[in-house]
Amino acid sequence: MTDASPALRPYVGRFAPSPSGPLHAGSIATALGSWLDARAHGGRWLVRIEDIDPPREQTGAAQAILNTLQRLGLHWDDTPLRQSAHLDRFEHALRSLEAGGQVYPCGCTRREIADSQSSGSAGGALHAERPYPGTCRAGLAPGRQARAWRLRVAPGVVQFNDRCLGSQAQEVSREVGDFVVRRADGLWAYQLAVVIDDAAQGVTDVVRGADLLGSTARQLLLTRTLGLPEPRYMHLPVVLAADGHKLSKQNGALAVDDQPPLLVLGQAMTHLGKHLGFDAPQISGAPPLQNWLAQATETWARRFGILRAF
Ligand code: GLU
């Protein structure tokens, strides 16, 4: 373990898509922002395929994602890592948390948790904002089978500085409660896997969509509990569909591979610039992709005050 702050370690960024479908305008804006930040810092940019949830996976999506990144000129360093190839890392982390008494087995079903929460709101599904009531915290009731594993969350506010959004704070114990690190279906929870792999890959800077902002405090808690180095975070504005919802295949994400790469990148950069306060480099005159990306990197470096000494 190292205490070195991310600014003192050589920059390593990453793009970590789940292969649940092809990239869409939203995930491309995230990929572009993360790539630009790495290149503006003269850092490395890794791609990690987060394929630990087979039921949500779409056959061929991982390769399609890599092909799209290539086509857009968003080249990566090293060989892309598939999370499924390193499941032993997660097992090892769980065992160490268990040895420290920081996780416990939980026998609750989703329905039991939902029923125990005194909310009359519609839907019935367990909502992330309703905290786990801690039913199994002091041990499984007699006759109950362990289903999931949860992290024991102590009271206290988790604070961090987001490079886009500024100071953030969440009281995980009150807002989320003890959260799942290994799911009842035996699969690894995203929260655990992302923390372990970011540390294993030496990631110093997590640049991703603001839809994941609500997970960051949980990930920091796990990072701290495991004694791993903390990355810096930058959450980028998400691209919304015309109906105001998050873009997804269901609400009409356009097939980006059918459009010219410069147009796709130009739209992503315009979206980022609109929210973050910069102008995207022109795509008129069809500049070579590499020239446009170099200009975009300059724009990014200027906007975020990144000194470019290389
Ligand atoms: N795999 C996650 C997703 O595709 C992103 C993980 C992350 O960037 O932390 O939504």
Image: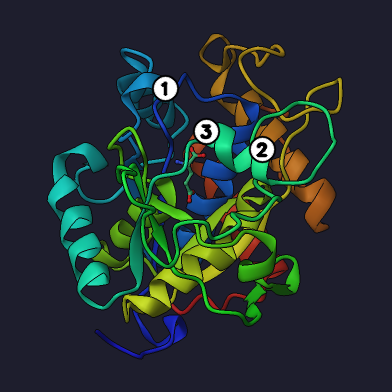
Q: Which residue is mark 3?
A: 288
In the rendered structure, which amino acid carries the disc numbered 1? Answer: Arg
Circles 2 and 3, Cβ within 8 Å, touching? The answer is no
Relative to residue 250, is residue 61 drawn left or right? Answer: left
Q: Residue at x 75, y 66 (%)?
A: 165
Name the kind of residue labelled 2 in the image.
Asp
Q: Is residue 247 above or below residue 91?
A: above
Q: Which residue is mark 2?
A: 115
Instruction: Give percent across and percent down for residue 107.
Output: 39, 45
- Disc with the residue nearer the chain's start (3 vs 1): 1
- Mark 2 → mark 3, Cα distance in angstroms: 58 Å
Mark in the foreground, 3 or 1: 1
In what element is the residue under mark 3? loop
Which amino acid type corresponds to the residue marked 3 in the rendered image? Pro
User: Based on the displayed image, in which of its 4 quarters is residue 26 positioned?
Assistant: top right
* Residue annotated with mark 1: 56
SS type, badge 1? helix
